[in-house]
Amino acid sequence: MNLTEWINPLKRPLIISGPCSAESPEQLLIIAGRLKKLGIPIMRAGVWKPRTRPGTFEGRGNEALQWLAQVKQQTGIMIATEVATAQHVEKACQAGVDILWIGARTTVNPFMVQEIADALKGTDKIVWVKNPLNPELALWLGALERINQSGISRLAGIHRGFTPFRQSRYRNLPLWQLPLELKSSCPQLPLIADPSHIAGSRNLIFEVAQRALDLGYDGLMIETHPDPDKALSDSQQQITPETLEQILAQLHTYTPSSDNTVFLNKLEKLREQIDHIDRELIDTLAARMRLAEQIGEYKKENNVAVFQAERWKEIMESRPLWGEQVNLSAEFMRELYRIIHDESIRVQTQIFNRSEHDAA
Ligand code: PEP
Ligand code: MN
């Protein structure tokens, strides 16, 4: 199974663009023409739109598939669209759609994903799986596995962010750690970012796209529309192909790795230093934990509860300040001490629960 076989011949980073929804044949032709001029090989366009609330535009359906087929025929651009049922798969395959993607609202549902996987058997489609709405790696991986088990090997994951509880800076929380964990469990799986759905507004697309490239993503999917303000879906986040061209010109791109020996030697030396410091760090953490254990024993002897709110408050106030003095962010310090404190509470609780018999 070679997951990267389809992406390797394409220019890196792979750019995919096109409207949120296919609205008319004219709209698709305008966009496809501009994308071709920019050297973008794949056009996206939603035909069936899963909308969170009813009563909004739900896509042009089967009719729009024919428009996509025409655009493909006239321009030679590859076409990608979203599928959410077995019937969608069948219709999209009949219309010659090159790439099918599973949307975030479908990835959450293993029944739907299995139905799609079964419908894909025997096809040689490229399939992309967007992350589920909720930050659960297993659900994302599970969907990719279901599709893969149907004989589809040309896969990719699309990172489109996770639903926030309240309004946040981005429409969807990026939680970059999660897609990076996907990449670590499947290093061969191409990872594409969807800055449009993460950002939710035009002015934030560049920063999200740059962050994805900094992290070594293989591609970007960015929504474009000839007249974004008039778009029938996601109008706030769609940009014109001209804006896309500017963004692409400003983005800094990287190679995934290098075989330059000077670079590799220096990198290895720095990594050796990191390994050394990590050992010291672990020894220091262990020494800290042994002290926490002594404190646990002492609290137990004196019948004092494990959790001491005052002490916790003091740690959470002082450590971010100490960190900032040596250029470590306050947020990093808070995260780190939350984890250390949780472990320390766990260890002390274990001491409390140990019976006298165990201790002897
Ligand atoms: C889309 O790509 O237009 C879309 C509906 O995406 P998501 O599934 O990420 O919400
Ligand atoms: Mn959209």
Image (cartoon, helix red, strand yellow):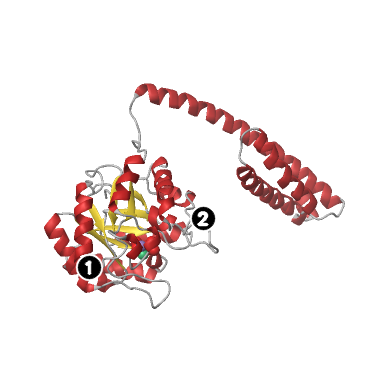
Q: CA distance from mark 1 to mark 2?
A: 32 Å
Q: Give the image quadrant in which the ligand numbered 2 is located.
A: bottom left
Q: Residues within 10 Å of mark 1 (few under 14, many from 20)?
A: few
Residue 152 spot, x, y in % from top left: 26, 58
Q: For residue 187, what is the image quadrant?
A: top left
Amino acid at the residue labelled 2: Arg
Q: Residue at x 72, y 53 (%)?
A: 350
Q: Residue at x 35, y 40 (%)?
A: 250
Residue picked out by circle 1? 24
Q: Residue at x 18, y 66 (%)?
A: 67
Instruction: Give the vertical position of 356 relative to 122 (above or below).
Output: above
Pointer 1 or 2: first along the chain: 1
Element marked by disc 1:
loop
Residue picked out by circle 2? 169
Residue 2 spot, x, y in % from top left: 26, 48
Element marked by disc 2:
loop
